[in-house]
Image (tube, grey):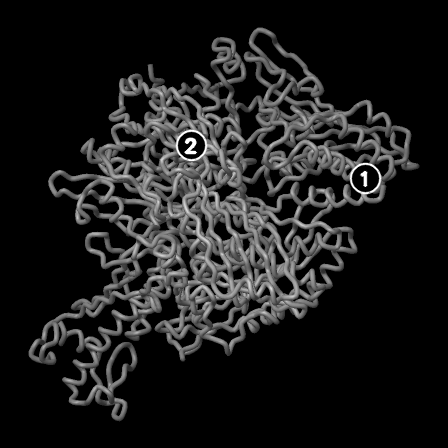
Amino acid sequence: MPPSLKTVEIKVNGIVRPRAVEPRTTLVDFLRDELGLTGTHVGCEHGVCGACSVLLDGQPVRSCCMFAVQADGLSVTTVEGLAPERGQLSKIQDSFCEKHALQCGYCTPGMLIACHALVAAHPHPSEAQIREAISGNLCRCTGYQQIVDAVQHATATEGAEGG
Amino acid sequence: MADQESFRFIGKHRRAVEHKRFVTGKGHYAADVQLPGMLHVALVASPYASARIVAIDVSAALEMAGVHAVLTGDELCDAVEPLLPGVDAPQVTRFPLARGVTRYAGEWVVAIAADTRALAEDAAELVMVDYEQLAHTVDPEAAIANGAALVHPEHGSNVIFQRKFVWGPVDRHFDESKHSLSYRVRWARNATVPIETFGVACAWSDATGILDVWASIQMPKYPDQLARALRLPGNAVRVHYDVDVGGSYGVKRGIKHTILVGYLARKLGRPVRLIEDRLENMRGGDMQGPDRIFDVTLAFDGDGIVHSMRMRALDDIGAYAGRSPLQLGKPVGAIIGPYRIQSVEYEAIAVMTNKTPQEAVRGFGQAPTNYAIETGIDKVARFLKMDRLELRRRNLIGKDEFPYLIPSGTTYDSGDYATVLSKALAAAPLAAIERERDTLRAKGLLAGIGFATCLEPSGGNSSFEPLFNPKNQTTTWMDSCLVRIDLSGSITALMATSTSGQAHETLVSTVVGEVLQRQPDSIRVLHADSLNALPSNSPVGSRMAIMLGGAAAGAAKKLRAKFMRIAAHNLGFPEAELEIVGDGDVASRNDPSQRISWDRLVEIAHRLHHLLPPDMEPGLQEKFVWEVPTGGQLPTDDGRVQMYPCHSFESHVVLASIDPQTGKVALHRYVCGHDCGVMISPDVVHGMTYGGIAHGIGAALMEKFCFNEEGQLLSGTFMDYLIPSSQEIPTVTIVDHCTPSPLTEFGQKGSGEAGYLGSPAAVASAINDALAPHGAVIDALPMTPQAIWLALQQVQSANTGASR
Amino acid sequence: MKAAPFDYVRAESTMHALGLLAEHGGDAKLLAGGQSLVPMMAMRLARPALLVDIHRLTDLKSIFIEAGRITLGAGVRQCEIEVKSELDSSVPLVRQALRWVGHSQTRNRGTLGGSLVHADPSAELPLATLVLGATMRLHSQTGGERRVNASDFFLGPMFTAVSESECLVTVDYPVWQGGRIGSAFDETAIRHGDFAMASAACQLQLDAQGVCRRASFGLGGVSGTPLSFPGLAQRLEGERISAALVAEVAHAAARESDPGSDMHAGAEYRRHLAAVLLSRVLLQAANDALAAH
């Protein structure tokens, strides 16, 4: 007999989204399939590639390594929730575009999540800190270089060139 | 001739058009496609390298609620046409599901379509397959020996392709050369392994008789092959090329997945999708890459001039042929690398084993071949006790020698290899990294500097097809673009294939903007579907800057020519006196006040027929379809043919150190000199070069599809197939040079495969330079910490043994 | 890769969780961070009928710092330990080991207890915990509290002394008293954050003359469990730490290990790494101890 559905109330990008889900539905599948937020991507489903990264109560986590039921009552931010306003981009999103920090775009949402979390904790991260922060996000297109450049560009001090 | 600086838009920094949707999570990937009533596929795979299917019991799976179909090879293989190899081996057929026998561990045997992917996996567990294991072959050299278990007995041999080419007087050059040096290198199986797996959704409509397909695809002639397999006319298949592809770099050729899903969609009358999970992708997705043993002999003189080369390339393609046997053919077009080698004997052997099949990987065989050649160049230098750079300089084709015809029939269009090398060395700078190397050595580390000077053939003229299969007389490798200007004067361009990160929309809008002198950001670029698309052969072989860029320019030029005629007709001046000014206006050179604006020209073309020149087609829409420059010829009997038209070049310099106690490698400095002619989108070119270098570092140091003796894939997850992270890739400095191509509109060459074609060779060169003072050498990739440690151990025990 | 169906309960208290374990036995599994368990379930290598989520239980999240002992709740997340720099004055080896654990995403969910109970032979926290001679406190509904020393806790690959009805509740790390204590952790992995091919950890205490008073060290990734070497440790006590002595001890320890082989590292190479890494951490710890007060 199939296990019963569980009710979850997860706040996603600022809005509580009550749903009934199978316990085995991962958080990433919940976001994508239940809520239609397809910006978060699935790359490996075993916790290595980081494409599924979201912010859970402000911290980056692998949403493929969590069941949605575990996030009941918690707050999730996805890539769709990073822009400050409709039609705008966050400083990091904008820098990604300026510095060509993406190509196919598949790892990008996870990268942005990791970078936003980094900059929230370290407003002027060093290159070493940036590389450490994104070390759990695999990219096959960029070789990471322009991603590092983008974060440095976004966090350059006021008045410094390119800031 | 144009150069990098001559343009208004081309060659400038510009934000890629595509980025806005990707950074906001609004990409449109195959797994994002939601269709009402869509069913989901999961697969049952064979666990054995070689087995006979005795029986399949699907009854329990069929009974499960939510399951709509449980499909076996018995049904499918009768209902679809087989996939055939690109070489002449009609007995080596491939179907999406096995029938009767399975030929590799991971081969798909049963497909389940259910309401959800989870349910489909539940049902897959209930399928009972009875196998009888058969003898298997996993070693390629054993596979070609007598008595090996045959992967396809009907074919009679495990060799699916073998041909020895002799171009030029090889024997004479060997006789006349003072020295010869033989070596073997091994390129282990790796692939591009994009972060997005292959996915496809199909929907069939009885009402229209159209099969709609949304797929993460990068494949020439995909709709055509699909239609043929499903026994549909070509115009019954509509592939939506506006699906964003999450990385491909060659491998996303999911034709078997699509045939399976297309069949199910038609059978069930509901949309069906298969999104490979990572396990399916790694083992059964048939997207692994070249797996080669090279045996090479170089003939050279005491002054270091290399006269001739004998190369035998044995490639283990796995249990079926995808695009793979042909991947031994493309390197023919740059078989001597950037050197003046005068004659070549090249034997290409593609052998089948009971392993996952190969697919096209970035460079289509050039990266392993470059690794083999560059290894030899370094060995020759060591043999002669000559500086490796000096040896290269003596052999590099000089800038005044272009166009340069190589023994295998390809003409290299242009280049200045020595300058690119010098620029890279200056950027390192060489003296500083030599000091740093010495400092590292003084600390007790092993340290070395690696060099690689390699060709990047570009332009995707796939004449390796008729070269390797005379029955295939295909010589057309066209591409196209349609450009429209609407009543409001805004421009829309239509491209005819998919994109997987190469920023084609940016490429096309930049080019069209350049020709028409309109702001590129105002130009919209769309992807057609396969029913309304002009012909294309896909972004393969680094061809789109040339082919799509050329087609976009060609269509835009026709529109520009039309405007000139309209302007001449309305201003009363001959066309020769007119020029484009400002943002697409046309004016007289002699009297700029005689000017007609873009808006007016558009109005005339669309609305004011009485002002249109006689016999001119109304409206503003032009297409351009063209063949690859220098292409269109069949090979000669001795296998000479013009392969790709344009030849980019890269020169890598890398400083590496090794911890001798652990074998761990650190990369300290990485410089890449790069010449791909005029860069239309420099940010895009640089990005792909950084990415290609990262790929190459992975291939050099850590990536391998590892099979055990039972044909089991040991590296089937990301825990064991190791993709470099941000901590494994150093900061890279790219130094640009530009020798324009005489063959293209703006002097551009292709560069989608940049970096990857040279970095494995460069990293290997650095490691061996570090090991050389200790008498150790490694001639196999990947150079893992254990492999390096073992190489050092071998020398130590040999020394210990010798000293007894 | 979708998990097989299961039922899920969020435990309201440790007692609640223990009651469920008692009731369901082997069909139930505790879920804390899930960083190891969830991928295994996705691959259907683990298929518990019931997951009991203990990730939010505050009972399991305590951190007590006393003079002679540090008590960490099993449910303390690795990211919380990561920022708890006060631990460095008492059990520095824990945070030294943590630097090698995974990536930030995994540390934001993964727990101390989860890593210990998962007991991967290459994992860092089990090795550090063993070398520090910690005591695990296990609770069950009927058995009350049971204390198991780290040396008796790790029984085999992915296999510990925790029974089906028990939950690891806290880990007590004894704090070495007196000065001149140094510790070090090192490992060799192919990529940053990967499981170690071999790892080594040690803690040393020297006297004012630089003679070793106390030593504890261990190896990871070279056996079915992390290994400690109390007998060999005694070899160091009363001696000055020299390169030669360190090499002798490290090689002896490596010889006692029984590493497996996989595609990345064969047994011989792992054994060699073990000796190299153990030598390095012993020398590093000795240097740190000499510099410390």
- Answer yes or no: is residue A54 visible: no
The residue under the point 23% across, 44% down is: B228
Amino acid under disc 1 = Leu
Out of C47 and B341, give the one closest to the viewer.
B341
- Answer yes or no: is residue C31 visible: yes
Numbered disc 2: what chain? B
Instruction: Point out residue B457 in the picture as x, y percentages from the top left corner.
Output: 44, 63
Marks 2 & 1, CB-CB < 8 Å contact: no
Instruction: Point out residue C198 in the picture as x, y percentages from the top left corner.
Output: 68, 34
Numbered tag placed on residue B106 in the rendering: 2
Numbered disc 1: what chain? C
**Left or right: C203 with respect to B714?**
right
Badge 2 and badge 1 in a common chain: no
The residue under the point 59% across, 54% down is: B730
For this orientation, the residue located farthest to the right is C209
Q: Quadrant of the N terminus of chain C?
A: top left
Q: Secondary structure at mark 1?
A: helix
Give neighbour class at mark 1: few <14, some 14-19, many 20+ (Cα, 10 Å): many
> Within the image, what quadrant is residue B506 found in?
bottom left
Select label 2 or label 1 by which is in front.
2
Residue at the spot of label 1? C283
Instruction: Point out residue B118 in the picture as x, y percentages from the top left corner.
Output: 35, 27
**Left or right: A7 with respect to C256?**
left
The residue under the point 50% across, 18% down is: C29
Asked if B366 appears above or below B77 in the picture, the reply is: below
Disc 2 to disc 1, C-alpha distance: 48 Å
Give neighbour class at mark 2: few <14, some 14-19, many 20+ (Cα, 10 Å): many
Total numbered badges shown on the rendered structure: 2
Q: Quadrant of the C terminus of chain C?
A: top right
Amino acid under disc 2 = Gly
Out of B725 and C67, give the one closest to the viewer.
B725
Instruction: Point out residue B604 in the picture as x, y percentages from the top left corner.
Output: 13, 76
